[in-house]
Amino acid sequence: MLILEPKNGAKDVKAGPDWVTLNKRLKERANVPLLKRFYEAGVVNGDTPVSEVEFVALDLETTGLDPGKNDIVSIGLVPFTLNRIHCREAKHWIVKPGKPLEDDSVVFHGITHSDVSDAPDLRRILEEVLASLEGKIVVVHYRRIERDFIEAAVKSRLGETLLFPVVDTLEIESWYYRKPFQKFWSCLMKKPLTSIRLADSRRRYNLPFYQGHNALTDAIATAELLQAQIAHRFRGDYPIKALWR
């Protein structure tokens, strides 16, 4: 197992999966033309320095937290590199979920029944969404939401699974603020661990406050957070395979 070390703080960061090989296998297995085309765009070589990678930050708002029982209601994304966020190419969709909106989720993200009543199903915009992700490394804040919900939504509509590498800004923060000794002292002293939520993580890097729970705003916030994390924590020649999962 390859071990890589950032500039400071977090030791023993293990390289992620071999996504180049996995992508080739997924392309061979895909039967749906839309997914086959997505995989044909390929994945950047794992040894590519993060400074040379083209990213796209992705955020979803959903009807709940369980991809088996809930569905997507909005998608926001913005392409970026470590030097620039391409706001003119940012995209935002509200979509009609296949599962009913829950009252708690409406309060959380503010998307109401009337907002989704005339919205398209995800299937109608899926080609445009995947085209925006093709060939780029997706960046999220907590991959168990974004990747799992996309995977479940695509499988329910196309009958096949969509998988892709992600860089998780929440996981990066966890390398520094969820170490075993920190958890031990938190439990012993009965004090909460340092928050690694998006807004709190941004505050540590002196990034501006944005009102959360809008998919596009949160996508931009996530892109800025990764830029700050790499500037403070890593070298520009750090390989992308050390960050993707």
Image (cartoon, rainbow, N blue to C red):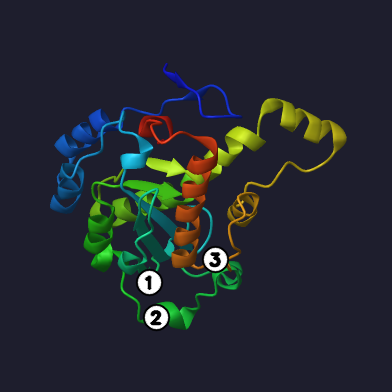
Distance from disc 1 to disc 2, alpha carbons, whole Å, reads: 7 Å
Distance from disc 2 to disc 3, alpha carbons, whole Å, reads: 20 Å
Residue 241 position within the rendered picture, expressed as x and y whole percent measured from the top left? 37, 31
The quadrant the C terminus occupies is top left
| N-term-proximal mark, 2 vs 3 | 2
Amino acid tagged 2? Ser
Q: Residues at badges 1 and 2 in contact (C-beta under 8 Å)? A: yes
Which of the 4 image quadrants contains residue 47?
top left
Pick the residue in front: 210 or 191.
210
Please count the marks in the image: 3
Picture layout, residue 94 above or below residue 223: below
Q: Secondary structure at mark 3?
A: loop
Q: Secondary structure at mark 1?
A: loop
Picture layout, residue 191 above or below residue 102: above
Report which residue position mark 2 lands on. 117
Report which residue position mark 3 lands on. 213
Q: Residue furthest right?
A: 189
The numbered disc on residue 96 is: 1
Picture layout, residue 244 above or below residue 180: below
* Residue drawn at (47%, 69%) of the image: 100
Q: Residues at badges 2 and 3 in contact (C-beta under 8 Å)? A: no
Amino acid tagged 1? Lys
Which of the 4 image quadrants contains residue 22?
top left
* Residue drawn at (30%, 50%) of the image: 155
Mark 1 burial class by Cα count in 10 Å: few <14, some 14-19, many 20+: many
The label nearer to you, 1 versus 3, is: 3
Question: Is any part of residue 164 visible from this angle?
Answer: no
